[in-house]
Amino acid sequence: MSWRPGKFDYVFFFLVFLDLWAMHLYPGLRLLTKPLIVSSLLVYYVMKAGDHQQAVILTALIFALLGDIFLMFDAPLFFQLGLGAFLVMQLCYTSYFSQQKKEMDALKWGIVGGVVLVALLFNGFYHSSFGALKWPVLFYTLAITAMVVTAIRQTGSSLLFYGALLFMVSDLSLAYHKFVAAIPMSGVLVMITYAFAQWLIVKGILDIESRRYPKA
């Protein structure tokens, strides 16, 4: 069955476009446009989940929003706070993913091996570039790797895997750009992969919950 975007999806796509527009033309507006992205997902989740809201998902989205806000300020302390906020978000998502039914085959084991290898190579090659943050970045990378691996293992919704994988791409791109070498149009790459990672994860969670608690 083909997927058709709903009203919220159009609103979400517009908010992502609005943030990218502000990023290049009116950076000051990002204090408003960037938080709107996850805020919209938070409101959407609350409205769609209704009485079956999961505290762990609410916590994940709230800390994702805090992380977005912290990373808008160019100072080491705010970067560390952002890192910590997203770490909490990842742990929450990992906890939710690990609760879903699991099934592994050769293809999934191969993907797990590839994800782990990328994480190891990234830290192995660039560990010295992270300076005083090398251990926090290493721990953060392990956490996001765990999130992706649990998303691969679960069978609740394939959207969780795609979302987690996009999140890893976003975070590794941000880390490479910040600590190793500049990536052309890195802001666009990081924001698009991050925004759609969150969108896919929330959509996947709501898909699982709609089947678990079908409406009468």
Image (spheres, rainbow, N blue to C red):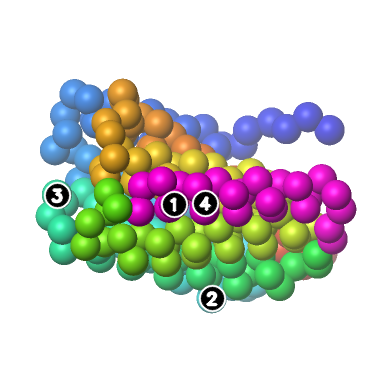
Per the rendering, the mark at residue 55 is 2
Which residue is tagged 4? 119
Q: Tell me the SS state at disc 4.
A: helix
- Count residues near mark 1 (Cα–Cα under 10 Å), then give few for <14, some for 14-19, many for 20+: few
Amino acid at dot 3 = Asp
Q: Nearer the viewer, mark 2 or mark 3?
A: 3
Real-space CA distance between mark 2 and mark 1, rounded to the nearest whole angstrom:
36 Å
Amino acid at dot 1 = Gly
Residue shown at 45% from the left, 47% from the top: 122
Circles 1 and 3: CB atoms closer than 8 Å = no
Q: Tell me the SS state at disc 2.
A: helix
Real-space CA distance between mark 2 and mark 4, rounded to the nearest whole angstrom:
29 Å
User: Residue 121 at x, y = what percent?
Assistant: 50, 47
Which residue is tagged 3? 74
The verdict on residue 163 being magenta is: no
Amino acid at dot 4 = Ala
Q: Where does the C terminus fall, quadrant-wise?
A: bottom right
Per the rendering, the mark at residue 3 is none
Q: Left or right: where does residue 111 sit relative to residue 178?
A: right
Magenta part of the chain: 103-127
Circles 2 and 1: CB atoms closer than 8 Å = no
